[in-house]
Image (tube, rainbow, N blue to C red):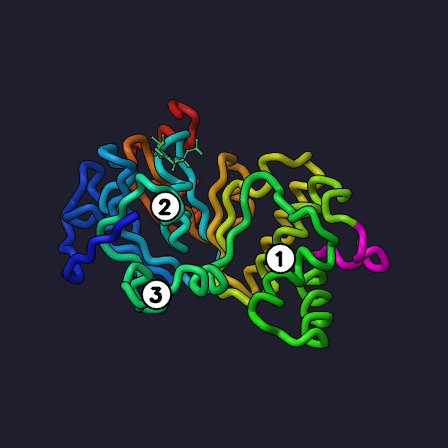
Amino acid sequence: MTANRRDSQSVPTAEIDERGSTAAADDRPLGSPRVSNPVIESRDLDVFYGDTQALHGIEMEIPEQQVTALIGPSGCGKSTFLRSINRMNDLIDVARVDGDLYFHGKNVYDDDVDPVALRRKIGMVFQKPNPFPKSIYDNVAYGLRVQGKDDGDVDEMVRTALEQAALLDEVDGQLEESGLDLSGGQQQRLCIARAIAPDPEVILMDEPASALDPVATSKIEDLIDDLAEDYTVVIVTHSMQQAARISDKTAVFLTGGHLVEFDDTEKIFENPESQQVEDYITGKFG
Ligand SMILES: Nc1ncnc2c1ncn2[C@@H]1O[C@H](COP(=O)(O)OP(=O)(O)OP(=O)(O)O)[C@@H](O)[C@H]1O
């Protein structure tokens, strides 16, 4: 994968859209609340798979210690955007990124950024729980050992991560048993423990509850709420109800890979600026 830098963007000027609201003049989406101290800033970000452009000029500022949901119809580029934040798209040969993606003001696509170190600061949880075929303990300890932590520290960090992932009570006393023997919901919480053990700042979640039953989903949603006290969470979800329940901010991507509107979740669901977003939210398409 290759990344091409561009000069930093000028602040876009405002114009009036067809519904009489203030919108940005370039690709900046409707809404776009000014975030005082964004953890992640996307500036005119394009992503291509070969000749196909999956994302167009994404402009977004993601606030610290909040839950930001990415929603939109299938194929609109939600997962692509999520993966571009911690350079998981690097692992796809045909993927190419243009534009800038800043983490605390540092472009993650700069040549001096180590993607592996970046992914410790920006962890990821996938749709399907994917524990290693190892013990519960080793699933969480693995990344810590790679970081060179002492065994004594690892013990405590494993327990803390399992506790933060709301799993410790259910698995205490059986940490040497296989992670694969847990239920689907427990496996996903184990994956969350694995992601938070190296002490990241941001956790990216790609439909983390879509493979789970309603009870397990509800536990994951409660957990996400708790995690946002310590971490910045960015979550892709197909469920608008879930986005409305758990997120502070919502970004609506629409077909063709455009970020159409980004705002407080309440605003998006109650009074969106864009007619297209309103049609999507009310189920008229998508
Ligand atoms: N590895 C890949 N190689 C080629 N094209 C890809 C690849 N991954 C995604 N795409 C294409 O990029 C576009 C955006 O896909 P992406 O998975 O990001 O969308 P999404 O909104 O997350 O979709 P879904 O909700 O169905 O998961 C789609 O047209 C998809 O076919």
| Residue 260 in view in this figure | no
Report if the beta carbon of the residue with label 1 is closer than 8 angstroms to ligand 1: no
Q: Which residue is mark 3?
A: 113
Q: Which residues are magenta?
A: 166-177
Q: Is residue 165 above or below residue 212?
A: below
Identify the residue at image location x=68%, y=71%.
Answer: 154
Q: Which residue is mark 2?
A: 81
- The picture places residue 166, in percent across and down from the top left corner, at 71, 56
The outermost residue toward the right is 173
> Considering the numbered disc 2 on the image, is that residue within a helix, a strand or a loop?
helix
Q: Is residue 211 above or below residue 87?
A: above
- In the figure, residue 77 lies in which quadrant? top left
- Nearer to us of marks 2 and 3 is 3
Q: CA distance from mark 1 to mark 3?
A: 22 Å
Which is more N-terminal, label 3 or label 1? 3
Identify the residue at image location x=66%, y=43%.
Answer: 218
The outermost residue toward the top is 284
Q: Quadrant where the C terminus lies? A: top left
Q: Mark 2 packing: few (<14 Cα in 10 Å), some, or many (20+)?
A: many
| Residue 159 in view in this figure | yes
Question: What kind of residue is marked 1?
Answer: Arg
- The picture places residue 242, in percent across and down from the top left corner, at 55, 40
Residue 260 vs residue 3, the one in the foreground: 3
